[in-house]
Amino acid sequence: MSSGSDGALSEVHRTAFMAAAMRAGHFLEGAEPKIFRDQFAPQLLEMSDDEIREFTAKVPLEMAASCVLRSRFTEDRLAAARGRLNQYVVLGAGLDSYALRMGDALESMIVFEVDDPPFQAWKKKRIEQLGLKTPGQVRYVPCDFERMSIDQALAAQGFAADEPCFISWLGVTQYLTREAIRTTLRWAGERPAGSEIVVTIVEPGAQEQRRARASDPVHFVSFISLEEMSDMLREAGFSRIEPLTQVAAREAYLKGRTDGLIIPEFQLSIAAIV
């Protein structure tokens, strides 16, 4: 994908394009009912529909499933939480299109898209090139997770620290040190009661799979088990911890499907409430 050729974007940033391509592939080719409908993913990518289909045809089914499952699970949880909060923080937003898809339906919800400055600049430029209108409720928050304070970055964009919020942190923790992960979780756990996070992890069992695929271009820093992440969340101040188990995912999202999507073995989405 040509967007990934920008020298300012790292290999980690390119995984955001890959995730969007998998969401786009599901939108174009996934069996009905779709697990997740991201009609803006094909537009945000600098790829033709045929190029998207060619890319996703090479992607393991469990990897494709992980992208659409985590997005659907997150937005289902967010929809259920909207009655108690009006702030949505997307950490490592990538090519997330929630705000574009919601449009006027955002109503009083403010969406804070937090991401690395070079990638965020690319995304904003791409949206402008497409002639799309970003809802007025969107706040772009440039932030390097390893070097900058999320607190300060959000405050500069009008985030209300004394009000509850919903936080999504998808496909990011594997690229960060445990220290950086704990720092972010502590910030999230200090949010007011009723705040909620959905975070994804790559479990240690995935290390062997990655060794078998020596061509993987992206280096993972942290492999974290469900038990370890649950401990991290509790230490950070979260009480109710609710992972999307394989049984729950199969029953809620994959039951009766005909497109061959399968549960990702070592990638988990976990919800937790303050």
Image: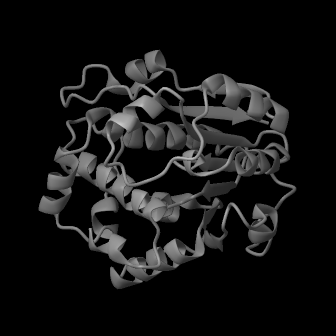
Give how far across and how far down residue 173 sits, in percent.
Answer: 60, 46
Count of all numbered marks drawn on residues in the image: 0
Give how far across and how far down residue 148 sits, in percent.
Answer: 75, 67
Task: Classify residue 85 as left or right of residue 123.
Answer: right
Quick check: can you spot residue 35? no
Compare residues 170 and 41 and report the one nearer the observer. Answer: 170
- Looking at the rendered image, the quarter that the C terminus falls into is top right
Give how far across and how far down residue 65 sits, in percent.
Answer: 34, 36
Residue 181's place in the image compared with 50, above or below, is above
Compare residues 258 and 234 and report the one nearer the observer. Answer: 234
Quick check: can you spot residue 131? yes
Residue 47's place in the image compared with 68, above or below, is below
Task: Classify residue 22 as left or right of residue 148.
Answer: left
- Looking at the rendered image, the quarter that the N terminus falls into is bottom left
Compare residues 183 and 134 and report the one nearer the observer. Answer: 183
Instruction: Identify the residue at image location x=59%, y=69%.
Output: 116
Instruction: Identify the colour scheme used.
Output: one colour
Task: Classify residue 59 as left or right of residue 211.
Answer: left
Residue 56's place in the image compared with 259, above or below, is below
Give how far across and how far down residue 142 sits, in percent.
Answer: 64, 73
Task: Classify residue 79 as left or right of residue 273.
Answer: left
Instruction: Identify the residue at image location x=50%, y=72%.
Output: 119
Instruction: Identify the residue at image location x=68%, y=43%.
Output: 83
Instruction: Identify the residue at image location x=68%, y=61%.
Output: 145
